[in-house]
Image: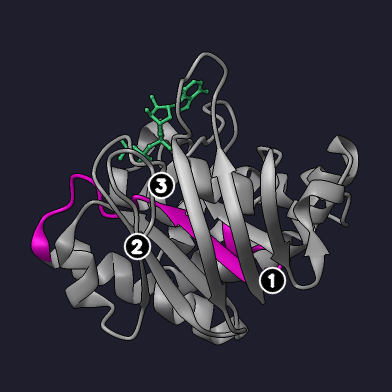
Amino acid sequence: MLQIAKLTHRYPGAHIPQLNVPAFSLARGEHAIVIGPSGSGKSTLLHLIAAILTPQNGDIRVADTSIATLAPRAADQWRGRHIGFLPQKLALIPSLNARDNILLAAYASGQASDSARADALLSALGLADKATAKPHQLSQGQKQRVALARAMFNRPQLLLADEPTANLDDASCRSAIALLLAQANELGASLILSTHDARVVEALPQGKLLRLHAAGAAS
Ligand SMILES: Nc1ncnc2c1ncn2[C@@H]1O[C@H](COP(=O)(O)OP(=O)(O)OP(=O)(O)O)[C@@H](O)[C@H]1O
């Protein structure tokens, strides 16, 4: 499902790479935790896997597609079909209700809009009565579930969640992980979570660990 080899990434102006992953792989249905302190490159790695950033050195393959070979427009469509991305900042559109925020996933990947699927996801995530609510009318946890529904909409093979437990108490942390895991397992998808939070490792003991360090090197 995912193979990474000799991957480094350096943003303009930086003297040394902010990310260095010599080798990492994940089979379909297997789960992983990318753990490391702030600034160690966790978000950068997820953005590279999702083809939001283009790899500069090394190779990332997702389901036999080499990310570096995707042209920008093709990358958007490819991402829409293969990757579910739950970003740290959720990125819900304030003027759209929950259902329409989820349907953006169809729009972004050039697929048919399917309100019934959006509503089924809302229902599965305990938000059946929130389809017409705008983001400002939702709690933080509800907003996260809408963003998760958007990530699941296209039935991705790989679900990426960037710091999904940031600012959550212990019980909410466990239930957020359980929810992500249940959704990934239902699709037979792989799940990759990034975190600096050791509680996530306890909540997902079956996850393969990829440790990043402050200088961006993995071990
Ligand atoms: N667009 C960018 N331009 C320049 N430098 C960047 C950019 N994005 C991130 N960086 C730098 O790259 C390094 C890794 O950042 P990244 O956001 O990937 O880390 P992180 O481990 O996800 O951090 P956090 O846990 O705080 O979210 C940091 O030093 C950051 O300042």
Q: Is mark 3 within 8 Å of ligand 1?
A: yes
Nearer to us in this view, 38 or 193: 38
Nearer to me, 107 or 86: 86
Q: Which one is closest to the eye, mark 1 or mark 3?
A: 3
Nearest to viewer (mark 2 / mark 3):
2
Q: Is residue 212 above or below residue 40?
A: below
Give the residue pinned by disc 3.
42
Q: Earlier in the sequence, mark 2 or mark 1?
A: 1
Instruction: Please tell me whether residue 159 belongs to the stretch shown in magenta.
Output: yes
Which of the two marks, 2 or 1, is nearer to us in this view? Answer: 2
Q: Amino acid at mark 1?
A: Arg
Q: Is residue 87 above or below residue 187?
A: above
Q: Write the start and end of the magenta stretch as one range.
A: 151-170
Q: Which mark is residue 155?
A: 1
* Colour option used: one colour
Q: Which mark is residue 219?
A: 2
Residue 150 visible from this viewpoint:
no
Identify which amino acid the numbered label 3 is placed on.
Answer: Lys
At label 1, counting other C-alpha atoms closer than 10 Å, the crowd grade (few under 14, some 14-19, many 20 or more) is: many
At a point 46% along the width and 21% down the height, the residue shown is: 15
Describe the element under mark 2 as helix, strand or loop: loop
